[in-house]
Every structure is written in C-alpha cells, then in structure tokens.
Amino acid sequence: MKSLLAGQRAAVLVEDPHDGSVLAMVSMPSYDPNPFVKGISYQDYGKLLHDKNLPLINRVTQGLYPPASTVKPYMAMSALLCGIITPQTTFFGAPTWTLPGTQRHYRDWKKTGHGMLDVTKAIEGICGYLFLSGRLYDGY
C-alpha cells in the first residue's frame, strides 16, 4: 500500500469483515521514527513539524473524512429495521435535489437521475438523491 500511496496524502484502513480486526493501516506521508529513539535534533524535528504535508499526523486515527457512500447501507438498514420502508418500497431517483429553505441544488452523479427504484437498487446505483433527501425517513 505504501508504494501505491507514495507522494500522496492519504489514509487506508483494511479490516477483517468477519471480526473487525485491523489487517493493515497506512497513513501517508509517513516519516522515519528512528531519529526519535536517540533524540531527534531540534532542526530535524522542526522540518517534520512544519512540513506542509503534515507527516506527523496519523491520517487513519486523526483525520476527519466524510463517510460518503459507505454509510448508505447502514442508513437503508436503519430505515428497514424501523419499519419506515420495506424492501419493496419504491422511490423516484431524481437527477437533482434542493435543500429545503435554500437555493442550494445537489446533483446526482447520474445526470438523468435513476428513475423508479427500491432500496436495493438505490444502494447498487449509488443514488445520492434518495439518501441526501431524507426520503428513507419520510414520516420518521
């Protein structure tokens, strides 16, 4: 993973899907921790501290990242378990959505929208409208 992420600011966490144990964790850019063992010089520490790429930050444990589409299955499962929707409930996946009370428009990745779909198809097609609009929780 380190070679794939070389030269980038990135975080990767790989978990075992069966028990959640961490299989791999990489934060880039990284730094050589060995100078800290015998005492790092003030100059070398200053270089690390003031590096614009912030190598001293562990992006896996300290970074703040929006969950994006990874949260959609959990939102869908919550709506299903709460009885707000059923697997057969259908929605219209519009191409845009406007935040109520604002002029802010959000576009779906699919310019024409997704048309009629159920929750499974919404997750498969990554239908942003359904999850952004709160349609899963109408009446909740």
Image: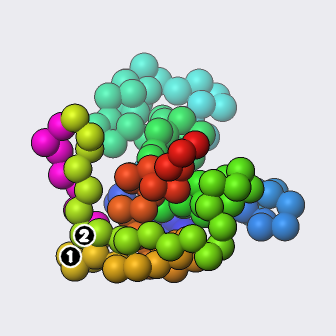
Q: Looking at the picture, how far across and down is residue 118, in whole percent?
A: 53, 76
Q: Badge 2, how many Cα within 10 Å: few under 14, some, many 20+?
A: some
Mark 2 or mark 1, which has the lower sequence index?
A: 2
Whether the magenta-drawn stretch holds residue 81 is answered as: no
Asked whether, in this view, residue 29 is left or right of residue 112, the answer is right
The numbered disc on residue 95 is 2
In the rendered structure, which segment of residues is drawn in magenta?
102-108
* Rendered-image quadrant of the N terminus: bottom right
Asked whether, in this view, residue 23 is left or right of residue 122, the answer is right
Corner quadrant of residue 96: bottom left
Is 125 situated above or below 132?
A: below
Corner quadrant of residue 127: bottom left
Q: Residue furthest left?
A: 103
Are the residues tagged 2 and 1 within 8 Å (C-beta)? Answer: yes
Residue 28 shows up from this direction: no
> How many dots with numbers?
2
The numbered disc on residue 74 is none
Residue pictured at 42% horizontal, 62% vertical: 130
Q: Amino acid at mark 1?
A: Lys
Q: Nearer the viewer, residue 3 or 79?
A: 79
Whether the magenta-drawn stretch holds residue 106 is answered as: yes
As helix, strand or loop, the secondary structure at mark 2 comes to: loop
Q: Nearer the viewer, residue 60 or 107?
A: 107
Residue 70 shows up from this direction: yes
Residue pictured at 40% horizontal, 79% vertical: 116
Q: Residue furthest right?
A: 19
Q: Nearer the viewer, residue 66 or 98?
A: 98
Q: Which residue is mark 1?
A: 111
Residue pictured at 81% horizontal, 57% vertical: 21
As helix, strand or loop, the secondary structure at mark 1 comes to: loop
Q: Nearer the viewer, residue 35 or 28?
A: 28
Q: Amino acid at mark 2?
A: Pro
